[in-house]
Amino acid sequence: MAHTMKDKEKLLARVARIRGQIGSIEKALGEEEQDCSAILQQIAACRGAINSLMSEVLEGHIRFHVMDPKVKPSRDQVDAVEELVDVIRAYIR
């Protein structure tokens, strides 16, 4: 089973929250005519949510597709995966 199917409910809930954030930005630009600083803050929050989602899916990809979950990895492989995941998290955020 793919990691996205295993975490399907959690990932879809995150996507729904992001959809709500984007809807708020659309409203702020259209109907509400909010101040640009408030809109920029909403955009930054949305970008953070998307980056977080990307990080989670990418980490799952590394752990379940780059590493073979059916084979016991060596200590060096585990350390390399953890280091890669940490670098990706730092870069995306």
Image (cartoon, grey):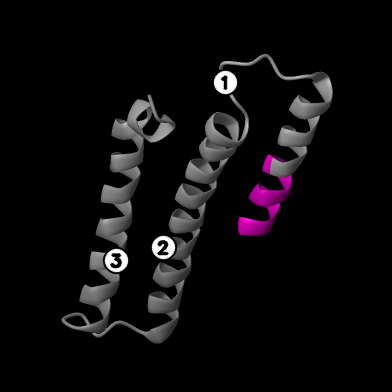
Residue 24 visible in image: yes
Quarter of the figure with residue 6: top left
In the rendered image, which residue does mark 2 sit on?
46
**What kind of residue is marked 1?**
Pro
Q: Nearer the viewer, residue 6 or 48?
A: 6
In the rendered image, which residue does mark 1 sit on?
69
Question: Eyeballing the image, is 31 above or below 49?
Answer: below
Q: Is residue 66 magenta?
A: no
In the rendered image, which residue does mark 3 sit on?
22
Mark 2 surroundings within 10 Å by alpha-carbon count, few (fewer than 14), some (14 through 19), many (20 or more): many
Side of 32 where 63 appears, left or right: right
Q: Position of residue 47 (x, y in %)?
A: 46, 64
Asked whether disc 3 touches disc 2, contact meaning CB atoms under 8 Å apart, the reply is yes
- The range drawn in magenta is 85-93
Q: Secondary structure at mark 1?
A: loop
Q: Name the mark nearer the viewer: 1 or 2.
A: 1
Q: Name the mark nearer the viewer: 1 or 3.
A: 1
Q: Is residue 90 magenta?
A: yes
Q: Position of residue 19 (x, y in %)?
A: 26, 58
Q: Position of residue 69 (x, y in %)?
A: 57, 21
Q: Secondary structure at mark 3?
A: helix
Question: Eyeballing the image, is 20 above or below 67?
Answer: below
**What kind of residue is marked 3?**
Ile
Cα separation between marks 3 and 2: 7 Å
